[in-house]
Amino acid sequence: MTRPFLAGEAVWIELSTSDPAAAESFYSQLLGWEVRHERIGSSTYRMCSLGGRDVAGISDAGALHAGHRGWITYFAVDDIDGSTRRAVSLGAELLTPPRYLPAAGAGGAVIDPFGAVFGLYQGESRAGVEMLNAVGALCWNELDTGEPEASVAFYRELFGFGTDRRDSPSAQPYTVLTLGAVPVAGVLELDNDWPNLLPSQWIAYFNVASLDEALARVVDLGGTPSVGPVASPHGRLHLVRDPGGHTLCLIELEDGLRPDTLLHDPAVSA
C-alpha cells in the first residue's frame, strides 16, 4: 500500500473458522501466505502475510466471534464505539463488541439487518492490509444479497458512500459503493441463478496468477469450485468454497479493482 485508508474503506479481511489450523494449511498452499501466530486473550490469531506484508487474518470462531464462521470484511472507522452504536441504531446486531487489539487498533463485528457479518476497525499501529491487488492478496470486497436496495441504503447511512450503478458480468444489477472517486466495494443482487450462496454475505476477492491452475489447486486441497468461471471487465473469476465451506472469489486480475494510490480528485482530498 502506498496510501492511507479512508474512513469507510474495506481495510482488513479475516476468516473466522472452527478449524484455524486446517484453514492455515489450505490458504498458505493456495495463495502462498506465510502465517505467524499471535495471542488475543486465550486464543491464537493467525496473521497471514506475503513477502512480509500482512494481507489477512484467521481466527477461531468460537473464541472470537461467538461461533460465526466465514470471511469477515472490516471497514475503517475513526470512532469504533460511535460507529458501532450507529450501526446498531440502523438495525444491525452486535456480534463482537469492540475490543483493543495489541499492536493493531480496536476492532469489533456486527450483523447487518439482512444477515451479513462485517467488521469495524479503528487502526492505530496497524492500519489494515499492507498490500492490495498483488497475486495472493485482496483485490475486492462484495456484498451478495437478496436485499440490494435496502442493503445499499444501510451502508450509505453508516459510511456515507456514494453509488455507481452497473450491470454485473451475469447481467444482474450491481452497485459500486464509492468514497469520492475511490471505489470501495460492490453490492450484487442475488437471484435463483446463484444457488450456492446465502443471501447477504460479504465475499473477499483474491488475485491469482492463473485461474485454471488455482481452481485445480482448490480441488487438490479439498475445496470446491461453485459458481464460474465468469468473464468480467477485470478478469476471469470463480467462486469457490474452502474445505471448511467458507466462500471466497478467485480472480485472474487484469487491472486493479481498488486503487492502491489515492486518486487525484477534489472529492477525495476535501
Image: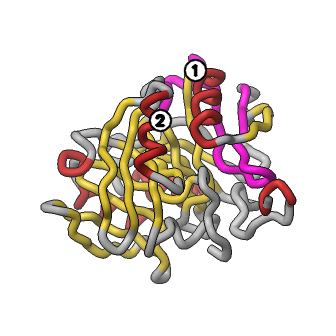
The location of residue 214, given as percent across then percent down, is 52, 58
* Residue at the (40%, 55%) spot, across then down: 14
The residue under label 2 is 87
Q: Between marks 2 and 1, how big is the CA–CA gap?
A: 17 Å
Q: Is residue 265 visible?
A: yes
Looking at the image, is 223 positioned above or below residue 139? Answer: above
Left or right: 223 in relation to 22:
right
Q: Is residue 202 above or below residue 51?
A: above
Which label sits in the foreground, 2 or 1? 2
User: Which quadrant of the figure has residue 130?
Assistant: bottom right
- The residue positioned farthest toward the top in the image shown: 192
Callout 2: SS? helix
* Amino acid identity at mark 2: Ala
Locate residue 113, reporting x and y percent. Answer: 46, 24
Q: Which residues are magenta?
A: 173-201
Q: Does any portion of residue 198 appear in the rendered image? A: no
Q: Earlier in the sequence, mark 2 or mark 1?
A: 2
Q: Nearer the viewer, residue 154 or 238?
A: 154
Q: How many marks?
A: 2
